[in-house]
Image: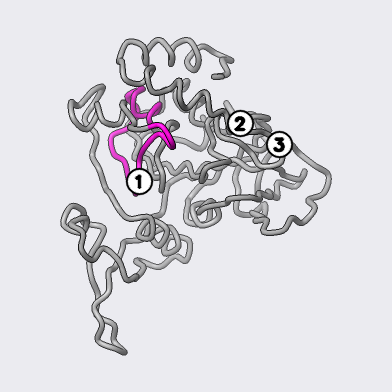
């Protein structure tokens, strides 16, 4: 059952050294504030999972907390490369980064298998690609009914999943709406779940296309208005496009990146804007 807690305490209790950590959110509802708290607490040796690692994972990788990345597409949306990600892969700075790369469909199916507590999922995918030769989490199976050979992907069960949402009620039920990506599946697949929200309300009003995570799914709910910045929370905040553009020159330079992290994230109480 979910407890309403401070972000500091929830991260300290739920995110552990060596964990597989999923921080999901597609275009909006990306849990930047929670990621920054992980950086402040220095929780290291993490295996990060995310369908679209963008700037939030560039920051965690550059901070030296990540040993492995489980992902599908990576980049700074609308701008270009993730330079801290590239530096880790190409030069091992600040530490070498192991990769487990998949297609979007493969990653989504891995979460679905994990949420269903199945050992793997099957799909028609990976054909014409060498991704299956680069990971031990893709294989193939033969359909017992048709004889068709299909791709099989291992279930993904994060130790902890962190998502951002618009609302929670006082019992810890969470509601999100808009582009909800695989947040539901990533939460159901995880051993522990932390949700940051824009606000606590007395009662959740159903929204078209909304997703509700019941309180029994979630371990902690933290009230963090603006916790998705520089991404956005539909109905509450707007995307800070200028930040994504400004991130490119910051991330290109190791010293500039380190200064930015020290001044905007590691300083207690800092809010990156």
Mark 2 or mark 1: name the one nearer the start of the chain: 1
Identify which residue, 192 or 196, lies in the foreground. 196
Mark 3 or mark 1: name the one nearer the start of the chain: 1
In-image side of 62 versus 78 (left or right): left
| Residue 27, horizontal then vertical, whole percent | 52, 42
Identify which residue, 247 or 266, lies in the foreground. 247
Q: Write the start and end of the magenta stretch as one range.
A: 58-79
Residue that badge 2 annotates:
227
**Residue lying at 41% horizontally and 54% vertically, measured from the top left:** 157
In-image side of 10 versus 17 (left or right): right
User: For the residue labelled by badge 1, is the local secondary structure a helix, a strand or a loop?
Assistant: loop
Say above or below: 73 vs 148: above
Residue that badge 3 annotates:
236
| Residue 34, horizontal then vertical, whole percent | 53, 31
Distance of mark 2 from mark 1, alpha carbons? 23 Å
Residue that badge 1 annotates:
73
Mark 2 or mark 3: name the one nearer the start of the chain: 2
Q: Nearer the viewer, mark 2 or mark 1?
A: 1
In-image side of 145 versus 192 (left or right): left
Residue 132: give its label.
Answer: none
User: For the residue labelled by badge 3, is the local secondary structure a helix, a strand or a loop?
Assistant: loop
In the current view of this chain or complex, which residue is farthest to the bottom?
145
Question: Do the numbered discs 2 and 3 sit on residues whose CB atoms are within 8 Å?
Answer: no
**Residue lying at 30% horizontally and 15% vertically, measured from the top left:** 254
* The stretch drawn in magenta includes residue 37: no
**Residue lying at 48% horizontally and 61% vertically, measured from the top left:** 115
Q: Quadrant of the C terminus?
A: top right
């Amino acid at each position: 059952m979910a407890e309403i807690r401070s972000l500091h305490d929830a991260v300290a209790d739920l995110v552990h050294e060596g964990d597989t950590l999923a921080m999901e959110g597609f275009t909006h509802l990306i849990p930047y504030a929670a990621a920054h708290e992980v950086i402040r607490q220095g929780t290291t040796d993490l295996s990060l999972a995310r369908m679209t690692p963008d700037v939030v994972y560039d920051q965690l990788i550059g901070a030296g907390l990540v040993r492995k990345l489980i992902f599908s597409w990576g980049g700074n949306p609308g701008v270009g490369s993730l330079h801290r990600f590239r530096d880790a892969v190409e030069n091992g700075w600040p530490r070498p980064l192991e990769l487990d790369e998949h297609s979007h469909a493969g990653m989504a199916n891995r979460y679905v298998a994990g949420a269903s507590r199945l050992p793997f999922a099957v799909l028609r995918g990976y054909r014409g690609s060498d991704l299956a030769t680069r990971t031990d989490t893709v294989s193939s199976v033969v359909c017992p009914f048709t004889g068709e050979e299909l791709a099989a992907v291992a279930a993904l069960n994060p130790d902890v999943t962190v998502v951002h949402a618009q609302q929670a009620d006082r019992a810890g039920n969470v509601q999100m709406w808009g582009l909800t990506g695989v947040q539901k599946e990533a939460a159901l697949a995880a051993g522990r779940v932390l949700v940051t929200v824009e606000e606590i309300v007395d009662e959740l009003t159903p929204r078209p296309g909304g997703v509700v995570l019941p309180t029994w799914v979630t371990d902690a709910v933290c009230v963090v208005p603006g916790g998705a910045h520089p991404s956005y929370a539909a109905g509450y905040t707007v995307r800070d496009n200028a930040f994504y553009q400004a991130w490119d020159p910051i991330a290109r330079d190791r010293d500039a990146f380190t200064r930015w992290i020290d001044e905007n994230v590691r300083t207690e109480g800092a809010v990156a804007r």
